[in-house]
Image: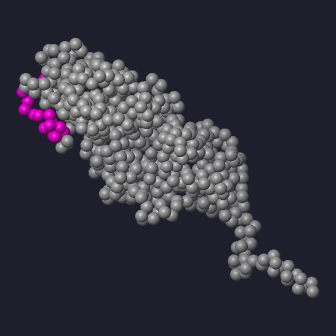
Amino acid sequence: FPDRFLEHSFDCHWSVRQIASESARGLKPDCPPLGLETLKIDDFQLHASSMRHYGLGPHRGRLNIQGGLYEDDMYDGGWCAGRSDPLQWFEVDARRLMKFTGVVTQGRSSLWLSDWVSSYKVLLSNDSHSWVTLKNGSRDLIFSANREKEIPVLNLFPKPVVARYIRINPRSWYASGGICMRVEIMGCPMPDPNNYYRRRNEVTTTDNLDFRHHSYKEMRQLMKVVNEMCPKITRIYNIGKSYNGQKLYAIEISDNPGEHELGEPEFRYTAGSHGNEVLGRELLLLLMQFMCQEYLSGNTRIRRLVDETRIHLLPSINPDGYEKASEAGSELSGWSLGRWSQDGLDIHHNFPDLNSVLWEAEARRWVPRKFHNHHVPIPDWYRSTNATVAVETRALVSWMEKIPFVLGGNLQGGELVVTFPFDRTRSVTALREATPTADDHVFRWLAFSYASTHRLMTDGNRRVCHTDDFTKEDGTINGALWHTAAGSMNDFSYLHTNCFELSMYVGCDKFPHETELPEEWENNRESLLVFMEQVHRGIKGVVRDVQGKGIANAIISVEGINHDIRTASDGDYWRLLNPGEYRVTVRAEGFSVSSKVCAVGYDIGASSCDFVLGRSNLSRIKEIMQKFNKQPISMRQRLRQRRLLDT
């Protein structure tokens, strides 16, 4: 093992406990992760002395990888050695010289079993045959590892070490378990003047954007910078506050910010409902920068989108949770730290369960005469001050009711898939069961529009993030078929408002390292734009009375689709539909019913379908009677009067 590749001496006086303590106080490694978690490191670069079975092979020894609900032979939650003895090892081939600086470890992800390594040695090599052990003076350096299976533990090396191969040799492990690990390696690539080691399919971006993680203060400052760059098309506002009092800032991008324009659809992207899923937050900050820059440079696609759409971007729904995750850092926040609101609630699944309300009404045959199939009312208990509802969720509900959104996407992390409603199964006992909405065909198209334009979601050759291969379903899935969850933001949006909402899981790594952001932006940029453009697919129009005044809350029904929408306060509406011909019927209290056939083409651009409603005879009679302060005469009174006259 050539001495010139060892960039440190082992006479360091730091103990491992001091190293761990320093890292816990915020000492971050200078080098980024190699990419076991982000899948930059391929399966064939991971090796081990032995494995319990294939599903616990070295290819599963990736930081934060999740095991399945049931233990199986294909997708378990880590690498587990076939034997429990000090001769076992887990190895990473970096495929080039790296300056290794540290190791992050976890135990096995399992609902039923407990396995983790409590101490280990580190060995390095250039040829995978001759190995040198990291030492503290003349003794082998023993690193303290995990005390439970989920919380990641970072051990920084006393000084960087240059090599190609790195091995972790477990020395002790949980007494009631076995040798199981999930790992990330910290390291910087050595200079490569000939670009010989360029990674396959590596992408770079030419966009001049702020590619870094932003604290709450930095996020506000960045939004302010965008607003100052593009004051004519942007507006910053907040929809409420978090549990800790941090404002939930949104930015509006429109040719006339601050007002709803007749006939112009409203679109929203939200991110960060789970505070530790930070990629979506950064993608929205990048998107607002990109749209401002491209609008100023005259990009016709962006100008058309801004001029014809009112766009709202809310990058951080749960800033309190984000602070918890960011304090730990990219590799140490784990799978759940910061996920929930400050008061311990999952914001994304904290909405009222309107599915049960609608399905019960359908079972009683109240729909559509006694109960509408849309704009399902929120139960009174949910609005009470004693209800277990996060303040962030209440702010979202108020925002969703105030603005007539047509289409929305909430960005999440930890997977590569787009999910669409319903998110809850009709069967209470079913954990997974396809539960489509009346607009299933539209939702499938919307989901595919994002997934198909993402660089990885539909790539059949890519490795699965955890246990599910979503490429078989074109990178999309019905939410309830994946796992049932009541009270989701997607289901609430569809059942209580006009807005069609989907979830985009934009990356396997919930909290990617800062160096990964440019590539993640390239992975998602086109998808973010294409999905926004889908708000212009279907029909749109204005419902007016004979005097030309818009009619609010008119019900728009499409024959064959058991889900209606309503007009906004000015009488305008937007109905997302796939190409085809549809018989559309409009009803409004006090007006006659009107129907017509509306055609939807294949090109982007909603087809106009306006309606003019005349007053109904009954409403005219009521107006006349009210005008002359007279009460309508009942039929029995009329018959009595006639009998008196006859006699």
Judged from this view, the residue extending furthest toward the right is: 647
Q: Which residue is located at x 14 percent, y 34 percent?
A: 16
Q: How is the image coloured?
A: one colour
Whether residue 529 is visible here, answered yes or no, is no
Is residue 401 placed above or below 178 in the rendered structure? Answer: below
Q: In this view, does 640 lie to the left or right of 483?
A: right
Which residue is nearer to you in this view: 82 or 399? 82
Location of residue 165 in the rendering, given as x and y in whole percent from the top left corner? 24, 20
Residue 239 belongs to the span the image colors magenta = no
Query: In x, y percent, where is residue 13?
Result: 7, 32
The image quadrant where one finds the C terminus is bottom right
Residue at 78%, 78% in the rendered image: 633
Q: Hey, which quadrant is residue 299 in on the image?
A: top left
Query: Residue, x 67% and y 64% (percent of image)?
Result: 589
- Residue 600 placement: quadrant: top right
Q: Please tell me which residue lies in front, 581 or 124.
A: 124
In percent of the image, x 39 and y 39: which residue is there?
413
Q: Where does residue 66 sit, x and y in percent of width and height?
A: 38, 34
Magenta span of residues? 7-23
Question: How many numbered marks have been drawn onto this rendered protein structure?
Answer: 0
x, y percent for residue 308 = 52, 47
- Left or right, 445 with respect to 453, comes to right
In this rendering, the answer to whether 507 lies above or below 308 is above
Q: Is residue 482 visible?
A: yes
Q: In which quarter of the image is the N terminus?
A: top left
Q: Nearer the viewer, residue 175 or 458?
A: 175
229 relative to 101, above or below = below
